[in-house]
Image (tube, rainbow, N blue to C red):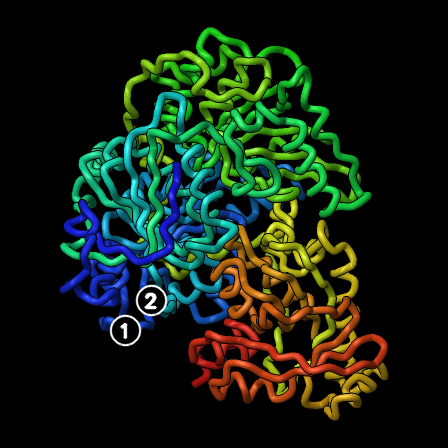
């Protein structure tokens, strides 16, 4: 199905590959002919063709987990008004079922901010963030920055980038997104998918092919090839949104009449233009996908890359599910009792729940296909349940008018309004030991909402909406949609803008600075954060040797998201489902640092500093997290800011899973150290790392520092720490202690 080609290729006229490269431009020159570089260079304020890019975006997107913190940070940094269209959707905390008034307080704050600063406000349950962007914000050749990792609109000719809130703050203050010019990987599509194959099948296969190797990490995926024309827009969108799970930087596709039609039915034909590679375009690698050979897929816990064909699972279910059980026991130990093999009865695997939702699942085409499979069927009245979430009110209205909703309801599907909750544990949490099959974006550990610390475990497998519907029609027995007969007679999607015209507040360029921001009691300012001192002493508060540590483990999703506007309250949940003792250790370290700053340095800290010949007065003292590869998953900055609120000063790892998490660390004044991959990190919580002269090294342009590791038994060893690459601004942000301090210092000049 998928071939990964780990070498450069030249594409000629967007149609064929060069077999003889004699006389062709050098790779660096020919890379400029990609769609990717055409868009990036047009947004680079320096206007050069250098290796460093300083990007200004055309628009921004946030949802109600992130926009309060972004606006609060921007206000503290000198915000005057929103300089570009900034849409704030309310699709994450829209359930409003946890914490009394706090979620709706955030929504009221968001509307008041849109009125004050000139923003776009999308009320709760009107649309999930990325569907609103597709319907109302994208333009061919444009770039959108979003505070959500799945900010991907490449299939509509608009490059989308997901980053933490700090990067959006920079744009609000008319600064730039600074990156090294990225490599570009061509995704070459051939053939056409069979009936029963959907976008999640292709996306899961793509993630499986490239995630473990890091083949596309921080690169841009550019989709082209003869197979593109065989995919409807919703199919393309469904693949594109999942490119985030490959850890790529962004994505872009060629555009054609299908994309033109999207803009026409959304009454914005002027926003379409053709995008295609130039005459000779160079790509740093290639992924060839034969759509005609695509199988129905299932991604088992605990990652979208843990994928099998459904037929493979059906052929050997006990062995495969036992491997998942063993993985769960390694992660959670004796905290949980897992029985996934018990889902196998008479050789068949039974699911307990089906969910079709969010930016990847709740599309019109997915719901139409699912309804066609379930027409005149029943999901039954046993343990299996199924829910569907149309991804916007226009999509919901279209499913109602075309009878799709009727067919789903008659089969026993529960239809709910636009809401991202099932994707991150704020809705439809399965029962203990429940197996949920979902057309959503992620199936990370506990992302569905279970709490291993309380003896709970539930599990999520990702499948396409078509196979979920086939499973529902088969009484919960996991079934490939390619194995069932059905006919989809529903008409193509027809967009109706009336609900947006009546409900969405369109305030761009209509700012009213006299408008008062409306606060609730849970909306709090950021606590004081200190600039970096000459030396840095770190006490390890968490040491995690898992292959990958997700942002959901660094700061759990689900009901904790209700506290995203209260930094102190939210920080109480940091690492709570992975290292429960972390918060307590950090608070003790933070208290000791406060005593040091007040001239009362604790004897233990004095003793450690004496071993390395340092003084307490010029040495900061903070907590530190070590993880092999942290930061896979969500863009939300709270994975880093919660560490900072608790006195965190650094992360140490072998590599960062994503650029966005590393950027979040920098923007919150957390030094992003790495160590060489052949170095064994054998320190434990309670051990110390001392980094002499760090401030001078960072401001002086150095890229590494020699540090001392001090173990509990008093042993002192050398350890080399790297912190490259850092831009000049990033170095100053770290020295100042965080992005807010950096802007405060700039405003004083």
Residue 715 percent location from the top left of the image: 80, 81
Front residue of this view, candidates 177 and 507: 177
Horizontal side of residue 156 vs 475, given as left or right: left
Q: Is residue 635 visible to the viewer in this orientation of the structure?
A: yes
Q: Specify the label residue 599 is tagged with.
A: none
Residue drawn at point x = 49 percent, y = 20 percent? 469
Residue placed most toward the observer, 719 or 534: 719
Q: Nearer the viewer, residue 715 or 392?
A: 715
Check the image and report above or below for 692 versus 457: below
Q: Identify the residue under disc 2.
A: 181
Residue 600 picture quarter: bottom right
Q: Position of residue 272 (x, y in %)?
A: 19, 44
**Other-residue count near label 1 (Cα within 10 Å), few / some / many at <14 / 14–19 / ≥20:** few
From the top left corner, tell me how far across and down residue 46 is, in percent: 26, 73
| Crowd class of label 2 (few under 14; some 14 to 19; many from 20; radius 10 Å) | some
**Marks 1/2: CA–CA distance:** 8 Å
**Rendering coords of residue 714 (x, y %):** 83, 81
Residue beneath the point at 53% across and 58% down: 657
Quadrant of res 263: top left
Quadrant location of the N terminus?
A: top left
- Residue 119 appears in the picture as rendered: no
What secondary structure is found at the residue carrying circle 1?
A: loop
Q: Are marks 1 and 2 in contact (CB under 8 Å)?
A: yes
Q: Image quadrant of residue 177? A: bottom left
Does 433 appear above or below 504? above
> Which residue is rendered at x = 45% and y = 44% of the image?
209
Q: Which residue has dot 1 on it?
A: 50
């Amino acid at each position: 199905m998928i071939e990964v080609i780990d070498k450069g290729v030249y594409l000629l006229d967007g149609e064929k590959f060069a077999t003889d490269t004699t006389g062709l431009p050098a790779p660096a020159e020919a890379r400029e002919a990609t769609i990717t570089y055409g868009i990036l260079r047009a947004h680079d304020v320096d206007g050069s063709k250098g290796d460093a890019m300083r990007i200004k975006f055309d628009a921004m997107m946030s949802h109600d987990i992130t926009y309060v913190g972004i606006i609060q940070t921007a206000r503290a940094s000198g915000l005057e008004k929103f300089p570009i269209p900034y849409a704030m959707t309310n699709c994450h905390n829209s359930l409003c079922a946890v914490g009394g008034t706090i979620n709706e307080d955030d929504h009221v704050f968001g509307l008041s901010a849109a009125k004050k600063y000139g923003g776009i406000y999308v009320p709760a349950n009107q649309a999930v963030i990325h569907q609103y962007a597709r319907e109302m914000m994208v333009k061919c050749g444009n770039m959108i920055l979003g505070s959500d990792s799945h900010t991907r609109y490449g299939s509509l000719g608009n490059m989308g980038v997901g980053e933490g809130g700090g990067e959006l703050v920079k744009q609000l203050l008319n600064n730039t997104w600074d990156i090294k010019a990225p490599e570009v990987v061509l995704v070459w599509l051939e053939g056409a998918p069979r009936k029963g194959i959907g976008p999640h099948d292709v996306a899961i296969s793509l993630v499986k092919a490239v995630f473990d190797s890091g083949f596309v990490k921080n690169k841009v995926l550019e989709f082209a090839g003869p197979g593109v024309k065989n995919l409807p827009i919703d199919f393309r969108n469904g693949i594109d949104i999942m490119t985030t799970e490959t850890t790529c930087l962004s994505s872009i596709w060629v555009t054609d009449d299908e994309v033109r039609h999207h803009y026409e039915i959304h009454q914005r034909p002027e926003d379409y233009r053709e995008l295609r590679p130039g005459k000779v375009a160079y790509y740093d690698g290639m992924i060839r996908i034969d759509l005609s050979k695509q199988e129905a897929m299932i991604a088992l816990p605990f990652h979208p890359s843990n994928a099998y064909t459904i037929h493979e699972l059906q052929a050997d279910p006990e062995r495969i599910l036992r491997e998942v059980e063993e993985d769960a026991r390694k992660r959670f130990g004796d905290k949980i009792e897992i029985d996934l093999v018990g889902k196998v009865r008479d050789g068949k695997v039974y699911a307990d729940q089906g969910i079709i939702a969010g930016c990847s699942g709740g599309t019109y085409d997915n719901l139409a296909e699912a309804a066609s499979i379930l027409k005149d069927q029943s999901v039954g009245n046993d343990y299996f349940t199924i829910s569907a979430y149309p991804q916007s009110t226009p999509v919901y209205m279209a499913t109602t008018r075309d009878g799709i909703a009727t067919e789903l309801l008659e089969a026993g599907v529960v239809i709910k309004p636009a809401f991202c909750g099932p994707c991150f544990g704020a809705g439809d949490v399965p029962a203990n030991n429940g197996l949920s099959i979902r057309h959503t974006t992620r199936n990370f550990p506990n992302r569905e909402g279970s709490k291993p610390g309380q003896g709970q475990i539930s599990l999520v497998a990702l499948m396409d909406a078509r196979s979920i519907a086939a499973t529902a029609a088969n009484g919960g027995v996991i079934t490939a949609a390619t194995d069932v007969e059905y006919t989809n007679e529903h008409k193509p999607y027809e967009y109706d803008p009336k609900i947006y015209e009546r409900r969405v507040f369109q305030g761009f360029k209509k700012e009213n600075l006299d408008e008062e921001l409306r606060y609730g009691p849970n909306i709090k300012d950021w606590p004081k954060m200190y600039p970096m001192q000459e030396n840095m002493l770190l006490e390890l508060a968490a040491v995690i040797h898992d292959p990958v540590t997700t942002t959901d483990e660094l700061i759990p999703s689900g009901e904790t998201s209700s506290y995203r506007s209260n930094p102190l309250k939210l920080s109480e949940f940091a690492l709570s489902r992975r290292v429960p003792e972390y918060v307590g250790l950090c608070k003790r370290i933070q208290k000791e640092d406060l005593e040091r700053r007040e001239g009362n340095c604790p004897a233990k800290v004095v003793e450690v500093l004496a071993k390395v010949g340092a003084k307490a007065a010029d040495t900061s003292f903070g907590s530190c997290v070590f993880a092999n590869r942290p930061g896979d998953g969500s863009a939300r900055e709270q994975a880093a800011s919660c560490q900072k609120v608790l006195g965190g000063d650094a992360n140490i790892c072998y590599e960062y899973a994503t650029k966005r998490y590393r950027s979040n660390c920098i923007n919150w004044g957390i030094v992003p150290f790495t160590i060489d991959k052949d170095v064994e990190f054998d320190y434990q919580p309670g051990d110390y790392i001392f980094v002499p002269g760090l401030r001078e090294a960072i401001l002086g342009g150095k890229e590494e520092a020699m540090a001392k590791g001090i173990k509990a038994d008093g042993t002192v060893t050398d350890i080399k720490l790297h912190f490259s690459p850092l831009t000049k601004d990033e170095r100053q942000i770290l020295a100042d202690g965080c992005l807010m301090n950096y802007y405060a210092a700039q405003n004083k000049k």
